[in-house]
Image (spheres, coloured by chain):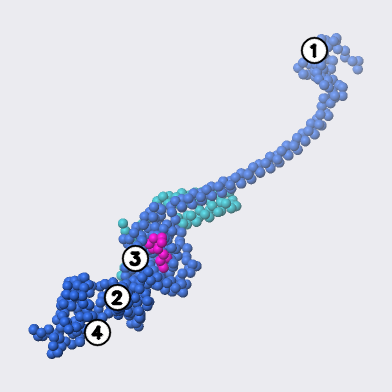
Chain colours: A blue, B cyan
């Protein structure tokens, strides 16, 4: 080890490119496979190193370029911790700020293209860890830290990003509960915007199969994490809408770290969900993860499996429903039949009553006839004290001719029959 | 007739039957209902899940490709 010299202190008298390079690499504990810096362009003397004397003085460009080559070659990208100050977002879109601790500071830049991976711009005073490379800005002879990732203490950048996005969506009315549409009860086609190889799709298909759902699941592939995820998710949602055959679309992914789920908090994705003409179900991560997408979707499912359940009625439920309809129909029809039977019975009763009246009428007529007959009958005569004589065969014995001495006969009187016998020879009367 | 349409028609039939309807009509509705119930139940039994993938061609036309 040639001593701990930081690059800043080494531009002194004992200037030695190679020692410096070694020192830089070793002091960081990283050595090695960096390439040797090329010799300065104006290096010509073999026995003298450039800048050893006033005659061989190197140019400023040589100095800064060499410093750039050495420093940039010496450092691998690192996470550096510090506090943000002097943050500025330049017109050209790049961010500039200082990262400092109690005794030192370094200028930092985040190029516009690298800001995609950073949830929100940092604020002065934030404690952050910045990942980047130490670079030299030769035109100014300054070192700067070129940052590509930034994380704030307590996840401050994500919190800030969430608040900003939420406020913007709110301002545009996209979080209003009345925007939420009902899901179709019997979707025939369910689009699923997710990773084609992810757990989410697997879970969704498994649930639909278990529920014996008759549907087409159409996967619309999109990266669900990483730098391209927001754009791919937006693109996939747009495809679903241009395609136009899906009845409902599930947007989501399985569980993961907060960073893994971050794409679903992206404003562009939230706006794409809100703009979808096809009703949306968001299903991001696990129950406890709530994303901005969840807030704008028509339905928020806690997990992809729950999304599949929300999207389709289960075969069991439908069977139950059919059973109930069948019962309703059966009892209604029976009730209706019973009603008719009741009517028939009433009618029958009326008919019976009517015929009974008829019978009564006939009966009374019969009685009157009977009464008339009665007055004409011999029975009435008998009642007045007369008697009728009949022989044993029932023939009326109308005159003396019919009687012989000793012959038995019957006397029919008012209240019965009196057996009798002829006593002596009948006498025809003188008349 | 889709399952949904069958279900809707069944609801309608049950509703009519529960109302005041002429006997001959009630019996016809009942018969229709039984037929619908039978076909809906058999459709449930034959549940079919298809998994496909959406592909957008260069000309902007879409096609679906079977998976599994």
Residue B65, visible in the rendered structure: no
Residue A260 - label: 3
Q: Does the magenta stretch include residue A415?
A: no
Cα–Cα span, label 3 and label 1:
135 Å
Q: Residues within 10 Å of mark 3 (few under 14, many from 20)?
A: some
Image coords of residue B29 (percent x, y): 53, 51
Sequence-wise, the earlier of marks 3 and 1 is: 3
Sequence-wise, the earlier of marks 2 and 3 is: 2
Sequence-wise, the earlier of marks 4 and 2 is: 4
Q: In which quarter of the image is residue A419?
A: top right
Q: Give the range drawn in magenta.
A: A283-294
Cα–Cα span, label 4 and label 2:
19 Å
Cα–Cα span, label 1 and label 4:
174 Å
Secondary element under disc 1, as helix, strand or loop, is strand
Cα–Cα span, label 2 and label 3:
21 Å
Q: What residue would you read off at disc 2?
A: A147
Q: Residue shown at 39%/69% (left/top)?
A: A265
Q: Are marks 4 and 2 on the same chain?
A: yes
Q: Are marks 2 and 3 on the same chain?
A: yes
Sequence-wise, the earlier of marks 1 and 4 is: 4
Tag 3 subunit: A
- Count of number-bearing discs: 4
**Up-down: is A417 above or below A338?**
above
Q: In which quarter of the image is residue A193?
A: bottom left
Secondary element under disc 4, as helix, strand or loop, is loop
**Up-down: is A74 above or below A402?**
below
Between disc 3 and disc 1, the foreground one is: 3
Secondary element under disc 3, as helix, strand or loop, is loop
Q: Residue shown at 41%/64% (left/top)?
A: A290
Q: What residue would you read off at disc 4?
A: A141
Image coords of residue A240 (percent x, y): 38, 66
Q: Is residue A182 left or right of residue A388?
A: left
């Amino acid at each position: 080890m040639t001593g701990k010299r930081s690059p800043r202190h080494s531009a002194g008298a004992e200037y030695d490119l190679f020692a410096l390079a070694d020192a830089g690499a070793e002091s960081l504990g990283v050595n090695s496979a960096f390439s040797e810096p090329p010799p300065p362009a104006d290096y010509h003397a073999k026995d003298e190193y450039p800048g050893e004397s006033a005659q061989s003085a190197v140019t400023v460009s040589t100095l800064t370029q060499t410093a750039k080559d050495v420093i940039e070659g010496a450092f691998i990208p690192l996470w550096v911790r510090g506090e943000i100050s002097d943050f500025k977002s330049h017109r050209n879109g790049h961010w500039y700020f200082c990262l400092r601790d109690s005794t030192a500071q370094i200028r930092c830049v985040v190029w516009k293209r690298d800001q995609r991976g950073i949830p929100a711009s940092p604020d002065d005073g934030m404690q952050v860890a910045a990942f980047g490379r130490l670079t030299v800005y030769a035109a100014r002879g300054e070192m700067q830290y070129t940052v590509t990732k930034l994380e704030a203490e307590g996840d401050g950048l994500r919190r800030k990003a969430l608040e900003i996005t939420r406020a913007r969506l709110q301002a545009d009315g996209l979080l209003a509960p009345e925007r939420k549409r009902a899901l179709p009860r019997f979707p025939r086609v369910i689009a699923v915007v997710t990773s084609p190889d992810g757990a989410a799709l697997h879970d969704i298909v498994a649930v639909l199969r278990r529920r014996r759902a008759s549907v087409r699941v159409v996967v619309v592939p999109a990266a669900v994490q990483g730098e391209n995820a927001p754009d791919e998710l937006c693109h996939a949602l747009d495809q679903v809408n241009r395609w136009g055959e899906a009845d409902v679309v599930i947007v989501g992914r399985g569980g993961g770290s907060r960073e893994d789920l971050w794409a679903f908090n992206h404003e562009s994705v939230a706006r794409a969900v809100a703009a979808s003409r096809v009703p949306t179900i968001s299903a991001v991560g696990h129950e406890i993860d709530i994303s901005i997408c969840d807030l704008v979707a028509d339905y928020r499912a806690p997990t992809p499996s729950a999304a599949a359940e929300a999207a389709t009625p289960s075969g069991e439920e439908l069977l139950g429903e059919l059973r109930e309809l069948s019962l309703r129909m059966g009892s209604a029809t029976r009730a209706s039949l019973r009603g008719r039977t009741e009517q028939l019975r009433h009618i029958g009763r009326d008919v019976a009553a009517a015929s009974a009246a008829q019978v009564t009428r006939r009966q009374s007529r019969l009685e009157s006839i009977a009464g008339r007959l009665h007055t004409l009958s011999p029975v009435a005569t008998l009642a007045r004290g007369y008697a009728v004589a009949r022989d044993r065969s029932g023939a009326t014995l109308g005159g003396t001719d019919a009687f012989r001495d000793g012959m038995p006969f019957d006397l029919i009187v008012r209240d019965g029959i009196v057996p009798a016998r002829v006593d002596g020879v009948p006498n025809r009367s003188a008349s | 007739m889709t399952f949904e349409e069958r279900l809707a028609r069944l609801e309608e039939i049950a509703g009519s039957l529960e109302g005041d309807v002429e006997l001959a009509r009630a019996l016809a509705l009942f018969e229709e209902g039984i037929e619908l119930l039978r076909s809906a139940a058999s459709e449930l039994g034959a549940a079919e899940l298809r998994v496909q993938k959406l592909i957008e061609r260069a000309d902007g036309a879409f096609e679906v490709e079977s998976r599994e």
